[in-house]
Image (cartoon, rainbow, N blue to C red):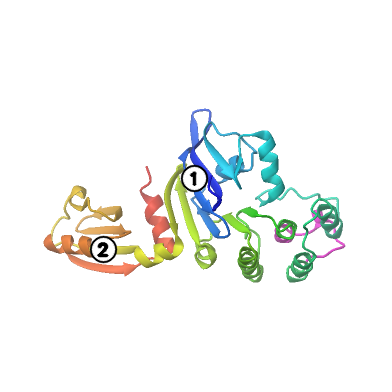
Amino acid sequence: MTDELAIETHGLTRHYGKVEAVRGLSLAVERQCITGFLGRNGAGKSTTIKMLLGMIRPTAGTGRVLGYDIADPVQSLQIRRRIAYVGEDKGLYGYMTVAELIRFTRSFYPDWQPHIEAHLLKAYQLPPGRKVKAISKGMRTKLALLLALARRPELIILDEPSEGLDPVSIEELLQTLQEVRAGGTSVFFSSHQLSEVERIADRVLMIDHGQLVMNTRLGDLLGNYRNIVMEFGAQAPVPTAFALAGVERLRIKGRQVWVLASSNVEGIVAHARTLDATVQVTPVNLRDVFLDLVREAP
């Protein structure tokens, strides 16, 4: 594992009986950047995160987080000491008050950041004297984020962090993640909210059916990828006619052909025109790419 990587996996695989939840996943997540981890429900995101955290063992393959082996029990403990995790199940002690839980958590972390605690306590409008079990789901999400971020971890892993938050709190969350990244913390988060990922991510990883279908810097994706729509006078040619460099996805219906291109746009357009097609090229957004990549997944 190189020093530049926060997370690295090779051929990571997890079976549940005959179900292959994650298949040969190889990831490289850079340090000090925000990485969006995308995939539809059941794609393997949560299973991958659980393997990275040492909560479940891989069936095959290897993985390291901050240089530590995820399959080694001793090294896995070192991982959990250096990272923070906010999952769908927040795992908070409901019998404590908000203030008691903050004090309790703070006692375990010598590098606790009081200014982050104070800032988020005020920004999230958390009620210090109320029992955790008595506050709303959205408030519990905010509290879990405070407990994670105030530790100032080397890496924070978040699974659907904006779930249950109102628009103002989501805005505060995104700003906070950008601030902790600027302070040197690596951020790895899964989300169904593509607009959130598009706003703050440096890199995007996308999986479907347990396999990696995209790993790219967001700026490269938005700058280089294009939608190409071709229309023919008669039935469109067969798919093999578009086996060209840069074609990531291809759909054909009647007289129309849709191509998602990562490069070689001019070459693809020139080829289409030799086939007497009219061609329209448009930029993409993250939603376009996500839908194209998961629509025809194997």
Query: Mark number for residue 62?
Result: none
Q: Nearer the viewer, residue 61 or 147?
A: 61
Position of 78 with respect to 253 (left or right) is right
Position of 105 with respect to 57 (left or right) is right
Q: Nearer the viewer, residue 39 or 267?
A: 267
Dot 1 or dot 2: first in sequence order is 1
Q: Position of residue 278 (x, y in %)?
A: 18, 67
Q: Which residues are magenta?
A: 126-143
> Who's the residue at 30% across and 60% down the image?
263
Residue tagged 1? 43
Numbered disc 1: secondary structure:
loop
Position of 251 with respect to 34 (left or right) is left
Q: Name the outermost residue toward the front.
A: 3
Numbered disc 2: secondary structure:
helix
Give how far apart the Cα atoms at labels 1 and 2 are: 30 Å
Q: Residues within 10 Å of mark 2 (few under 14, many from 20)?
A: many
Query: Is residue 180 rendered magenta in the image?
Result: no
Q: Nearer the viewer, residue 279 or 104?
A: 104
Position above or below: 164 against 49: below
> Who's the residue at 61% across and 63% down the image?
181
Number of numbered discs present?
2
Q: Position of residue 119 (x, y in %)?
A: 75, 70
Q: Nearer the viewer, mark 1 or mark 2?
A: 2
- Which quadrant of the rendered structure holds the C terminus? top left
